[in-house]
Image (cartoon, rainbow, N blue to C red):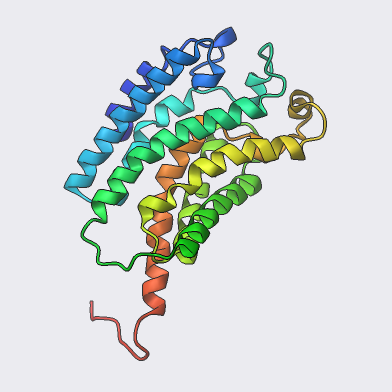
Amino acid sequence: MALLIVGPLLGVLTGFVPSADGIGTVTPLLSSSVFTGVVVWTVAIAIAGAFGLLVTSLTTWRLGVACIGLALVWSAWGTPRLDQLVRVDGMTNPATALALDGAFVTLVACAFAWFCAKRGERLDDTEPAPPQEMGLGVLACAVGAMVAVFVIARDERVGQAMGAAVVAGFLGGFGGRILGARVPAAWLLLGFPIAALASPIIGGMLTDGSIAAATYEGDVSSLLRVMPAHWAVGLLIGFPAGCAQANAMIEKQHEPAGAESPAT
């Protein structure tokens, strides 16, 4: 339902954001009207978030968070690739715009995911994590996400960029949970806006000369190839699975020695 019903409706909604040179569905800072972009994308993410909260109340927070990402897939799929973006006047070096845009869209999406995770974990009897562990978990989440994008996003194709973001969400959730085992999943989500903000900036530093020229030559840093909406969508889809995998490993390590698995 998130992908096939809510998603297309949100794709139509975000399509109303005015774009320069007809480059497709754009996020706020890449549009010709930042105010309209902010309002429309916030409303679209809020609708996806409301759907995610509904799913959380009926099932689990993991499915609710994933549904927020799935509901926004259509909107993210229509956003321009980096090679399309650098052809727009004034966008030959878009690293700063991509960083701020990515931080905004991902932060708003993670805010609604935070409510889902917080609601789902409300009954968990866990010890509060010390500040050092919380900081380490959030940092691991951010670094894991950036490493995944750096390794996987080898060209500007939308499928590869979004796939890299999904793996980034998985690796971020896995690493954040492993190094911050007592940190609630809701707080680990703070690492994702950091990753979406830092990646284009670091990618711009790693790219020699003009980003536009490097894009045409295929030498641009892979950290620049994942667009803002791809970050928000992929991270929320992959994050729950990464947390679940890490939880399974942690539980396995804490099983009593010699314990036998229950008969199936």
Give the percent coordinates (x, y) of residue 179. 49, 65
In the image, 49 versus 78, the foreground residue is 49
Position of 82 relative to 166 (above/below): above
> Which quarter of the picture shows residue 44?
top left
Is 5 placed above or below 246 here? above
Q: Position of residue 20 (x, y in %)?
A: 57, 10
Residue 155 position in % (x across, y down): 66, 35
Where residue 123 sits: x, y (%)? 20, 60
Residue displayed at 36% across by 51% down: 186
Residue 1 visible in image: no
* Residue 22 appears anywhere in the view: yes
Residue 244 lies in quadrant: bottom left
| Residue occupying image coordinates x 33% and y 38% | 112
Q: Residue at x 61, y 25 (%)?
A: 97
- Which of the 4 image quadrants contains residue 236? top left
Residue lying furthest right in this view? 209
